[in-house]
Image: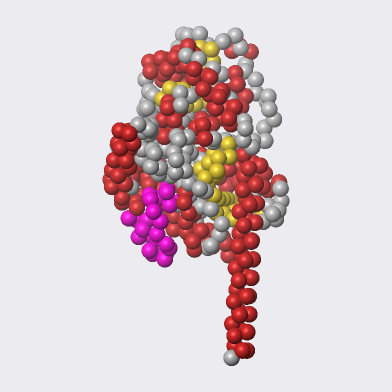
């Protein structure tokens, strides 16, 4: 199937773009005609990979700034549920038609054979129904499709499989449908009618999951809650991690820090710029201790932090290659970005997580549920809470054992090879379907012609 035209389309955010870069580079190397549609912030990254970039045109490009800057009215909503409802409507539902109209224009000059999009890309149902293109959705966070066995997604409630627990979860799903997803569901139905599309069941994320021909889940079953009604189009492909061209062993821990036997890695990623949330309380927690804290700031206030915390047991850098610093670390403190969590698991690193918004609550709930680490269930943990959690990680070896077990499960998967396999199967089935439809049409015409002659 080499030479086929494939369009990647991603929600314009780091955690949605970066995990797909390795897949895109591989397909390009294998001879596929690759293009990518997403926010302007990622233009240079994509072009550096040798892939043609298409910008958001009609769609709002909220990769240009913080969510509260792009949507100033978002600041009015303080509660987790209110923010969730606002985000679903403004970042997802209303962007779907805009994404579609941009892709419709791209298709005029690049008649692609397949759309590959992350599962938050709400243009999927429009492209599938209006352009009649096969679509693969890639889930870059935990599974979001509603299940009869689980609580509603988005509230970070861990499942119960008792009779009483199931009844409670059923009630919670009903409440969520009525009070969290109802407005966005009505808006989706309105948009579908406007575009003459067939209706779909469930909330907006259910629709995306079910509309895709295949939903490829980044991760493995061991990091998902058990559900008996898993979608028939779902395939686990192992952890998807960003493409890197850096040679291994390019970074070494500076000599003066090598005597430390306890090492903690802390990061907030590149999107969260408020260092007071996790980095500062972590540094405060381990001042004058025998624990080496390795802090990566993503470029946010690195110099200021070094001046503020000149302690001998602190190493503060803009960036350090995680694949090189994680193997020498003993604990990982993070706000719970999915890519960083998967990388931490792959490196057998137990975690302390503190993050609530942008879906991190669901990721962190799984870390606590599967005892891969400790979930602090807050955006701004205190130094005392962080120190206590890290000390628990050091002393309770069960966390390390659980992470190692899941890491071994990760190693059983070959994400890129599985991805190409599913692409080829889908495109072959599409070609066969088109061929069969053509043959059926020819036979119908022959039958009609023979009938006319007989008459």
Of residues 350 and 75, the one nearer the viewer is 350
Q: Residue 147's image quarter?
A: top left
Q: Residue 227's image quarter?
A: top left
- Residue 152 rendering spot, x and y as whole percentages: 36, 40
- Residue 52 rendering spot, x and y as whole percentages: 63, 52
Of residues 4 and 429, the one nearer the viewer is 429
Of residues 284 and 90, the one nearer the viewer is 90
Q: Is residue 45 visible?
A: no
Q: Is residue 330 visible?
A: yes
Q: How many marks?
A: 0
The N terminus appears in which quarter of the rendering? bottom right
Task: Name the side, left or right, on which 155 lies relative to 37.
Answer: left
Q: Residue furthest bottom?
A: 455
Classify 311 as above or below 402: above
- Residue 151 rendering spot, x and y as whole percentages: 36, 38
Classify 76 as above or below 344: below
Task: Name the side, left or right, on which 202 lies relative to 324.
Answer: left
Q: Residue at x 34, y 51 (%)?
A: 184
The C terminus appears in which quarter of the rendering? bottom right
Q: Which residues are magenta?
A: 186-208
Classify 408 as above or below 244: above
């Amino acid at each position: 199937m080499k030479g086929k035209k494939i369009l990647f389309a991603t929600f314009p955010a780091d955690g949605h773009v970066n995990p797909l870069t390795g897949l895109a580079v591989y397909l390009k190397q294998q001879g596929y005609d690759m293009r990518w549609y997403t926010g302007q912030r990622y233009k240079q990254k994509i072009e550096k990979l040798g892939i043609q970039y298409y910008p958001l045109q009609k769609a709002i490009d909220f990769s240009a700034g913080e969510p509260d800057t792009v949507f100033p009215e978002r600041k009015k909503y303080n509660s987790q549920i209110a923010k969730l409802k606002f985000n679903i409507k403004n970042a997802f539902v209303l962007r779907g038609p805009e994404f579609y109209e941009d892709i419709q224009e791209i298709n005029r000059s690049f008649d692609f054979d397949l759309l590959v999009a992350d599962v938050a890309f709400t243009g999927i149902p429009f492209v599938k129904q209006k352009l009649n293109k096969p679509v693969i959705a890639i889930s870059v966070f935990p599974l979001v499709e509603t299940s009869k066995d689980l609580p509603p997604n988005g509230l970070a409630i861990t499942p119960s499989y008792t009779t009483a627990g199931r009844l409670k979860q059923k009630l919670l799903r009903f409440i969520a449908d009525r009070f969290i997803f109802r407005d966005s569901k009505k808006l989706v139905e309105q948009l579908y009618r406007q575009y003459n599309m067939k209706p779909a069941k469930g909330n907006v994320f259910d629709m995306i999951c079910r509309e895709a021909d295949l939903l490829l889940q980044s991760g493995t079953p061991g990091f998902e809650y058990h559900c008996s009604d898993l979608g028939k189009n779902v395939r686990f492909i192992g952890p998807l991690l960003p493409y890197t061209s850096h040679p291994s062993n390019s970074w070494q821990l500076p000599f003066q820090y090598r005597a430390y036997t306890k090492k903690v890695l802390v990061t907030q990623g590149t999107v969260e710029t408020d260092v007071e949330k996790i980095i500062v309380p972590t540094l405060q927690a381990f001042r004058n201790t025998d624990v080496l804290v390795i802090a990566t700031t993503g470029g946010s206030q690195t110099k200021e932090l070094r001046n503020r915390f000149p302690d001998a047991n602190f190493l503060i850098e803009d960036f350090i290659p995680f694949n090189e610093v994680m193997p020498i670390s003993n604990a990982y403190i993070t706000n719970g970005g999915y890519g960083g969590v998967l990388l931490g698991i792959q490196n057998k690193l137990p975690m302390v997580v503190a993050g609530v918004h942008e879906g991190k609550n669901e990721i962190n709930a799984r870390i606590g549920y599967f005892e891969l680490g400790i979930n602090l269930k807050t955006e701004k943990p205190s130094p005392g809470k962080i120190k206590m959690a890290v000390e628990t990680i050091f002393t309770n070896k069960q966390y390390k054992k659980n992470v190692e077990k899941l890491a071994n499960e990760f190693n059983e998967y070959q994400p890129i090879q599985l991805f190409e396999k599913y692409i080829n199967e889908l495109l072959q089935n599409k070609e066969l379907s088109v061929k069969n439809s053509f043959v059926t049409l020819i036979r119908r015409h022959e039958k009609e012609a023979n009938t006319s002659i007989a008459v």
